[in-house]
Amino acid sequence: MCLGTAAGIAAGYLADVALGDPRHGHPVALFGACAARLERVTYSDDRRAGVFHTGVLLGALAAAAMAGEGAARRRGPAWVAASTAVATFGALGGTSLTRTGARMADLLAGDDVDAARRLLPSLCGRDPAALNVDGLVRASVESVAENTSDAQVAPLLWAAVGGVPALLVYRGANTLDAMIGHHSPRYERFGWAAAKLDDALNAVAARLAGVLVAFEDVMARELHLFLRQSIEEEKDNDARDPDLPRDGGDHFVLRRARRKVAPALKIVRGKVVQRIG
């Protein structure tokens, strides 16, 4: 991976963190609209038709991405970084997923079931009217877990491995899987190729996402315990130190404890804040 690609991935990630998904003209939605139009011509209740449909769409996407990246490389690293940043920003969806998941958690915690049902289609395709509170929780957690890999970990992984072409082909395959890669009378055979390809492309990323989530949880637990122990130790030391200012109380102690683990806190700041709070 060249420096321009790495810089572009970082810039695209930061743009997603700052801006979230664009409200209009999202590249994934535009690709989906093209796929839906093509399906009117290519659809047949047959696996070969599905292979052709998937191959045409992803082949066109790969060809366009390779041509664009080739042109960017001829112009220099700055162009590579810019094109990679745009593609990465368009492919990622982690910030919007986080916001929607947090909103769903707030609604369910506040027992606003009707609002939670209205929000659920933003996370998954299940019928919210058929779900009680437990069903809404399960659907939301499953969707957030799956899309953490699909819309965040996997795009970053494929961008690092193969640049813009690999990133866009992955995101295209993932979109096709969401559209046609499910068990239904219409798509059981036609969507077979899209489903199998998405499974293969996500094989490593899904496991990596699981490892990262588990690591984050372990780190959050350990940091929570460390902070609590640090606070207690500082309290004991402060009680024996007559020259220590007494104004500030626990806030003074907590600031001293946090300085010890500031770099690590940044890694898992969300969970640590939740656990400490």
Image (cartoon, rainbow, N blue to C red):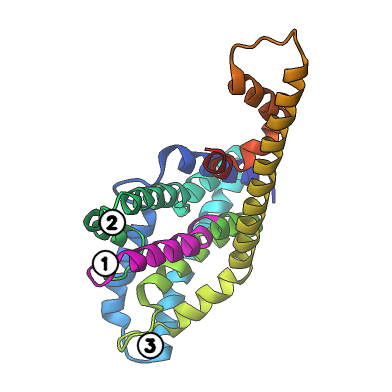
Residue 137 placement: quadrant = bottom left
Distance from the alpha carbon under mark 2 to that under mark 3: 31 Å
Decide: is 26 above or below 211: above
Q: Secondary structure at mark 3?
A: loop
Vertical relation: 142 (above or below) 81: below
Q: Are marks 2 and 3 in contact (CB under 8 Å)?
A: no
The residue carrying mark 2 is 116
From this viewpoint, is residue 256 visible? yes
Q: Are marks 3 and 1 in contact (CB under 8 Å)?
A: no
Q: Residue at x 57, y 39 (%)?
A: 276
Identify which residue, 38 or 23, lies in the foreground. 23
Q: Looking at the image, tell me whether mark 2 or mark 1 is earlier in sequence order.
A: 2
Decide which of tag 3 and tag 1 comes sooner along the chain: 1
Snapshot quadrant of residue 233: top right
Disc 2 is placed on an element classified as: helix
Percent position of residue 9, x then y: 58, 46
Vertical side of 79 occupied by 100: above or below: below
Query: Which range of residues does the magenta coloring cover?
Result: 128-152
**Foreground of the two, 52 or 92:** 92
Q: Which residue is mark 1?
A: 128
Could you tell me the amino acid type at mark 3? Glu
Camera-near label (3 vs 1) is: 1
- Mark 2 and mark 1 in contact? Answer it, CB < 8 Å: yes
